[in-house]
Image (spheres, rainbow, N blue to C red):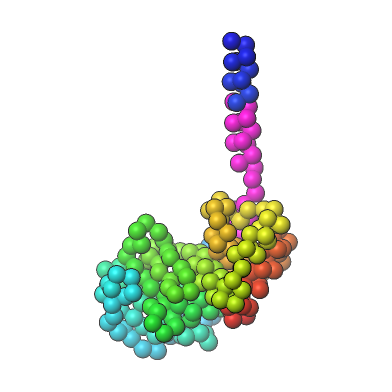
C-alpha cells in the first residue's frame, strides 16, 4: 500500500513537472507574431489589374471561377477566385499588399504557365491554405499571416529544385538553434520552415530582423539562402 502510494505521488509529480515545462517552453511566435499581424504599413504599392476577369475552370476540381492578370510593384502574377467562394478581388488585393515585396516572388512562381496563381476557394477541406511551387490555394477568411506562411512553402520548394536537401539542412538548423518557432512548427521541418518564413516577413516589415537573427541564427541564415535560391533576393 505504501509502495502504491509512493508510485502514485511520483507519477503525479512527473505530470506536474511536464505541464510546467510545456508552459515555460519558449516559442518565437509568441514574441514576433505581433509584427505579422501589423504588417503592410510601410508598403506603398497598390495592386493593378492588367487583364480580366476571365472565366476559367480552376485546377482544383475544375471549379468555375474568374481569373485576373495583375501586378504589384514590379511583380506580375495571377489571381483566381472560385465563384462559389464569393470572395472579392479588393479583399484579396488588400492582403497581398500587406506582405513585404520580397515575398511577391511566391505569387509569381505559382502564376507560371498552367498554374492558377493565388487561388481563392470557398473551402479546402478544413485547411486555411495549401501551398507549393505549383499552387497557392487559400480560403477567403485567411489572414495575411497565412499568406506569409504559404509563401514559405512555395519558395522552399522552388529552392529544392537546386538543392534537394534543403529540408535536411533546415532540420540541422532548427536543432542547432535550440528554440521552437511555434507549436505547429514542432511537428515537421517544412512547417517549422513556413512558420519561420511568416515571422521573417513580419520582422522585415517592422525592422526587427536583427532580433529574429539573434534568437534563431541558423534558421535565419538558411532562410536568406532559400530566398536567394528562389530568386526572391
Residue at x 69% of width, y 68% of height: 221
* Residue 67 as seen in the image, left or right of residue 230: left
Residue at x 54% of width, y 53% of height: 187
Residue at x 67% of width, y 53% of height: 179
Quarter assignment of residue 118:
bottom left
**Where is the N terminus found, in terms of image quarters?**
top right
Question: Magenta stretch: residue 22 in it?
Answer: yes
- In this orientation, which residue lies closer to the viewer: 66 or 13? 13
- In this orientation, which residue lies closer to the viewer: 116 or 35? 116
- In this orientation, which residue lies closer to the viewer: 223 or 86? 223
**Where is the C terminus found, in terms of image quarters?**
bottom right
Residue at x 56% of width, y 70% of height: 156
Main SS of the magenta part reads helix
Q: Is residue 57 above or below residue 52?
A: above
Residue sticking out furthest to the front: 164
Residue 98 visible, this angle: no
Q: Residue 163, percent across and down?
A: 61, 74
Residue sticking out furthest to the top: 1
Q: Is residue 45 above or below residue 60?
A: below
* Residue 231 as seen in the image, left or right of residue 134: right
Question: Magenta stretch: residue 213 in it?
Answer: no
Q: Residue 57, percent across and down?
A: 28, 77
Q: Which residues are magenta?
A: 12-34
* Residue 37 as seen in the image, left or right of residue 87: right
Residue 174 visible, this angle: yes
- In this orientation, which residue lies closer to the viewer: 139 or 160? 160
* Residue 175 as seen in the image, left or right of residue 197: right
Q: Residue 169, percent across and down?
A: 65, 65
Q: How many marks?
A: 0
Residue sticking out furthest to the bottom: 50
Amino acid at each position: 500500500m505504501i509502495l502504491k502510494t509512493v508510485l502514485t505521488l511520483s507519477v503525479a509529480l512527473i505530470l506536474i513537472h511536464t505541464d510546467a515545462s510545456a508552459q515555460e517552453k519558449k516559442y518565437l511566435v509568441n514574441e514576433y507574431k505581433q509584427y505579422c499581424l501589423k504588417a503592410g504599413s510601410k508598403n506603398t504599392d497598390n495592386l493593378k489589374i492588367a487583364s480580366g476577369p476571365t472565366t476559367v475552370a480552376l485546377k482544383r476540381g475544375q471549379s468555375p471561377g474568374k481569373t485576373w492578370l495583375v501586378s504589384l510593384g514590379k511583380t506580375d502574377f495571377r489571381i483566381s477566385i472560385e465563384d462559389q467562394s464569393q470572395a472579392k478581388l479588393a479583399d484579396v488585393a488588400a492582403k497581398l499588399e500587406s506582405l513585404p515585396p520580397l515575398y511577391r516572388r511566391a505569387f509569381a512562381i505559382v502564376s507560371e504557365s498552367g498554374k492558377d496563381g493565388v487561388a481563392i476557394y470557398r473551402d479546402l477541406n478544413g485547411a486555411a491554405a495549401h501551398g507549393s511551387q505549383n499552387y497557392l490555394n487559400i480560403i477567403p477568411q485567411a489572414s495575411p499571416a497565412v499568406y506569409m506562411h504559404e509563401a514559405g512553402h512555395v519558395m522552399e520548394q522552388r529552392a529544392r529544385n537546386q538543392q534537394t536537401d534543403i529540408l535536411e539542412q533546415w532540420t540541422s538548423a532548427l536543432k542547432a538553434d535550440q528554440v521552437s518557432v511555434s507549436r505547429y512548427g514542432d511537428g515537421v521541418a517544412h512547417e517549422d520552415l513556413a512558420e519561420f518564413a511568416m515571422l521573417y516577413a513580419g520582422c522585415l516589415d517592422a525592422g526587427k530582423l536583427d532580433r529574429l537573427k539573434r534568437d534563431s541564427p541558423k534558421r535565419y541564415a538558411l532562410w536568406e539562402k532559400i530566398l536567394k535560391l528562389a530568386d526572391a533576393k
